[in-house]
Image (tube, helix red, strand yellow):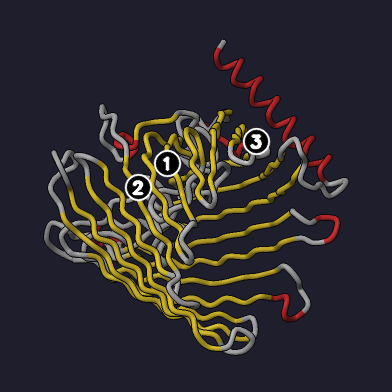
Amino acid sequence: MLRKITGLALALLLSLLFTAAAFAADEEKKASEWGTVTGQARLYYFTQRNKTTGDDFDNIKESFALGGWLKYETPWLMDHFGGGAALYGTMPITGELNQRKQGGTGLLDPANNEGFAVLGEAYLKARYSETEARVWRQRLETPFINSNDSRMLPQSYEAYGFKSSDIDTVQASLYWVDKEKARDSEVFEPMTKMAGLDGTDGGVLMAGVDWTPVDDYPTRFWNYYAPDLDNTFFTELKYLFGDPQGVAYELLFQGVDQRSVGEQRAGNYSTGEAGLMGTLKYAGISLNVGGSIVDDSYGIRNSWGNYPFFNNLMSYAFNRAGEKTLLLGVGYDFSRVGFKGFKADIKAGFGDTPDSGRNASPDRNEYDLNTYYDFDGELKGLSLLGRFSYQDADGDLGGKDGFQVRLRLQYNFQLL
């Protein structure tokens, strides 16, 4: 009975979602005194295939699904109070591309490659001047706790806190994050359980400052304290210089310090990572060269979101103990030659790890091709994403080669 109710709810959500998308395409909507209704529809194909033995890529994860979200947000009441709610839903497109045993793609329920619907956001908000507080289910976008929105649905959290821009050049945030809904789940679980500690019910105290002391020098300082688990401090320093209309340059430094605290339920560890990347931009071309190194004692735990380092590619995050990584990238904006909205880039990551000792692991390389196209005119809001990754791992230490394909058609719309 529960499965039938869930299926009906999912069918209703998706019907509303795509009906709304079609209606929104008729005309452009402006802000309403009744609030805003926004949505996103996605059609998504994903596969990851790895070798087990021999030359065949016979370990397969694969899904073909459609879904998205529909969100209502109230206007500001008395200029200080409001709220919002969003329904999330995803369902398989039936056929050979959604076999039960080939789940785990992040598009559908990992256990059976089936769909689900969930109230992904439901929050109250209040503001005074440039400070806004939100409580309960919401999306968060910070370095280590974020929506990780690279599949069908975003991650969301049960959290309580505020962000403030009352101080010029500074945005400060303070949140207690209690639970997380993974992008392929309808259940909100305690943060410590999401970090792999079964039977626990702990949260995370998150505080951060995004500060631009002078033009062209944005900085980030974020700390995540999970009682009896660990403390993670992340910093990012960026320097922009050159001529934005000519040759422009960017230097990016990122660093993380992570260590166990309290009862150290995941073990006693202290580790860190540091990386530096340079970018050159000219006439639509961008070139990237970067390198990073992880402390050789332990790898970096990344339990709650998309890993924030520049060397995090489609499959590998390059954050294992003792890992040294070289990143190379090149991209081009084809609007420069008449193909407005079309961009592409190639990235390659080369990871070297210890060959012996307790932290020995296979060296791994990854090669990614990413293409993006944003439609314009009557199809504005529609976009197409294509991504391909090849992973080359050292077989002497148990590494398995693999490849990944992502194809996504997406439509963003607003009704009110």
Disc 3 or 2, which lies upstream in sequence?
3
Q: Is residue 307 above or below residue 268?
A: below
Question: Disc 3 marks which residue?
Answer: 77
Q: Residue at x 41, y 62 (%)?
A: 312
What kind of residue is marked 2?
Answer: Met
Q: Secondary structure at mark 1?
A: strand
Q: Is residue 352 above or below residue 408?
A: below
**Foreground of the two, 183 or 358:** 183
Q: Residue 334, percent across and down?
A: 70, 76
Q: Residue 112, percent across and down?
A: 49, 29
Residue 206's mark? 2
Disc 2 or 1, which lies upstream in sequence?
1
**Foreground of the two, 70 or 56:** 70
Question: Disc 1 marks which residue?
Answer: 161
Q: Nearer the viewer, mark 3 or mark 2?
A: 3
Residue 94's mark? none
Residue 184 in sight in this render? yes
Characterize the local packing of mark 3: few (<14), some (14-19) or many (20 or more) Cα atoms within 10 angstroms.
Answer: few
Q: Is residue 276 above or below residue 26?
A: below
Quadrant (top left/top right/bottom left/bottom right) for the N terminus: top right
Q: What is the CA distance from the residue labelled 2 to the residue labelled 1? A: 9 Å
Q: Are marks 2 and 1 in contact (CB under 8 Å)?
A: yes
**Foreground of the two, 274 or 353:** 274
Q: Residue at x 48, y 46 (%)?
A: 140
